[in-house]
Amino acid sequence: MRKLYVYFLGALCLFFAASCKKEGFLAQTQTTNLSESTVFADSANTVAFLSNIYSNAGFSFNPGRFTYTSAGGQTPNGGLDAASDEAEVASSNGTTALAFETGTINAAVVTDDAYSACYSNIRAVNQFLKNVPQSPIRDFVKTQYKAEARFLRAWYYAILLKHYGGIHLVGDTIYNYTDHIPAKRNTYAECVNYIVSECDAAAQDLPLVQVGLSYGRASRGACMALKSRVLLYAASPLFNGNTLASGEVGALVGYPAYDKERWKLAKNAAEAIIASSAYSLNMDNSTPGIGFQQLFTMRYNTEYIFALMRGSNSDFESLWDPPSRTGKNGAFPLQGLVDAFPMRNGLPITDPASNYDPNNPYTGRDPRLEYSVIHDQTPLANRLAAGFSPVNIYTGNFNGVGEGPDAVRVGTRTGYYTNKMLDPGAVASDITHVSKRCWPLMRYAEILLNYAEAANEYDGPTSQVYEAVEKIRQRAGLNPYQLPAGLSQNVMRQVIQNERRIELAFEEHRFWDVRRWKIAEQTDNILSMGMEVNRNGAAVSYKPFAVRQRNFRTAMYLWPFPQAEVAKSPELIQNPGY
């Protein structure tokens, strides 16, 4: 458990080793010969110390999170998108994502990033809270900074909670190597209560939204949104009356008994954000769904509630662009995700009235499909062509062998590339054509869907549930965007789950959603599929093909604690099945 609490040098490493150029309040400060006393004796260094705690907030979201060692160093091989039924890893080299795909994840092979990164940053927060009173900063600013730090501590605990269930709560303690470092896990209920209470406390000293030079810092809205997410997870089937274990272990991985009122708490938390009127969807349907696409290129918008601030970047282009655009190492979307997008008329492609044509499978679809997935002939920026040109994923001779660097089985393992969050003006490996984007860690669309889900579970499919879901569908460009009247609670549940799947694709939701809904045994025990497009002159055909048999076992509803950590203390109880 010693890794759990790195000494002060570890926090200073966070201070110095920001992984990228930042702008605004995340700008790096160049300093040397720093100690704990000198850091907090200087206002700029104090602010930089807090800023570097922010800089790690997106590690779990990162689509290049999982890496393997190659000749060039650590090579990305997907994130939680590849560990779910959204996408396939780029390489067969072993990573945590591949282990989740194949069902071979265990305590010896799982990455320890969630455990080590979260506890390192929690300790850094505690150091900040201990020392900031002595820093030469105005008192009202200190009050806000302390609230931001408490939000960040809750943020990292929430990441730990969704990975492992109940974890050890440190409080404000800063342990040293000479101390006995306790490892006993708190119950799931204790962890939820602590995170919620920290969100509530921090919210009192923060503005509802952050503006100007403070844009990107934690706000009262961010506290409310994190509370909404944590309470929604807590109300969900995996944790609300869990069946993974009983007795002492059962209380660590969920609430032993189901309580419907937990859905009401989740509903109220999301409803409070909606009622604040502080956030709204980015609406612009001058072209169907363009507001959805543009959102992810906008540094400042009314929809992002908490985001990882970035300098000018081509983060996602470098991972997801096809090889012809010099992208590489991102995960490849699966056919199951593509099929989840309805037609533009809002009907699923399986509905005979939807007008879906398997010989023209991408025509007339939900506009979000084009903005989320690159398929054969999708137009994409190409600096070599000085503009946009189609991506050629097809084969040319009906033999299944791809032609060109982007072709199926050559550049992509599934016949698709990811388009979500790509900036049309940015190109991978190009320092001129870059994006001003930041990473959306929590946004208003999630809150609307949080509310719809919790309200549907507690009250049934009320008019307010309809309204929340239909706002998402309207912004998507569906016509009509209205849902059929008279849906049952179960059908509405399925609608909401699919809306989350497609609206929030590649934003670190699907992996956790199928687990908290306890449906991963159906969604992840699958033969995943891709699409081969054959072109020979004017003749075009579409042929689904098998990508990988995926396997899921019950233990995989939670992550295993890394074996190295379990071995350090008998107090740390491993999760069931590992």
Image (cartoon, rainbow, N blue to C red):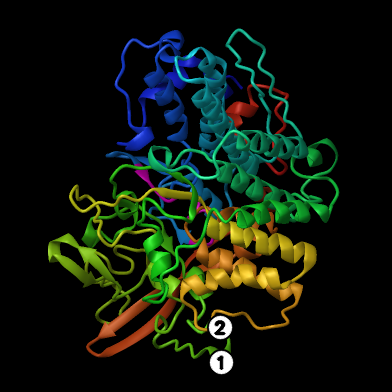
Q: Quadrant of residue 202?
A: top right
| Kind of residue at badge 1 | Ala
Magenta stretch: includes residue 216:
no
| Kind of residue at badge 2 | Leu
With respect to residue 383, does 567 lie above or below? Answer: above
Left or right of 418, for residue 382: left
Q: Tell me whether the residue at label 1 lies in contact with that at label 2, contact meaning CB atoms closer than 8 angstroms.
A: yes
Left or right of 162, for residue 415: left
SS at badge 1: helix
Q: Quadrant of residue 495?
A: bottom right
**The magenta segment:** 75-86
With respect to residue 255, does 236 lie above or below? Answer: below
Which residue is located at x 66 percent, y 64 percent?
452
Q: Position of residue 370 (x, y in %)?
A: 39, 72
For the residue pair 511 and 22, the one nearer the viewer reads as 22
User: Label 2 neighbourhood size at 10 Å, few (<14), some (14-19), many (20+)?
Assistant: many
Numbered label attached to residue 347: 2
User: Label 1 neighbourhood size at 10 Å, few (<14), some (14-19), many (20+)?
Assistant: few
Quadrant, the C terminus: top right
Q: Position of residue 167 (x, y in %)?
A: 68, 33
Distance from Cα at disc 1 to Cα at disc 2: 8 Å
Quadrant, the N terminus: top right
Can residue 373 be seen here? The reply is no
Q: Dot 1 corresponds to which residue?
A: 353
Magenta stretch: includes residue 85:
yes
SS at badge 2: loop
Left or right of 475, for residue 326: left
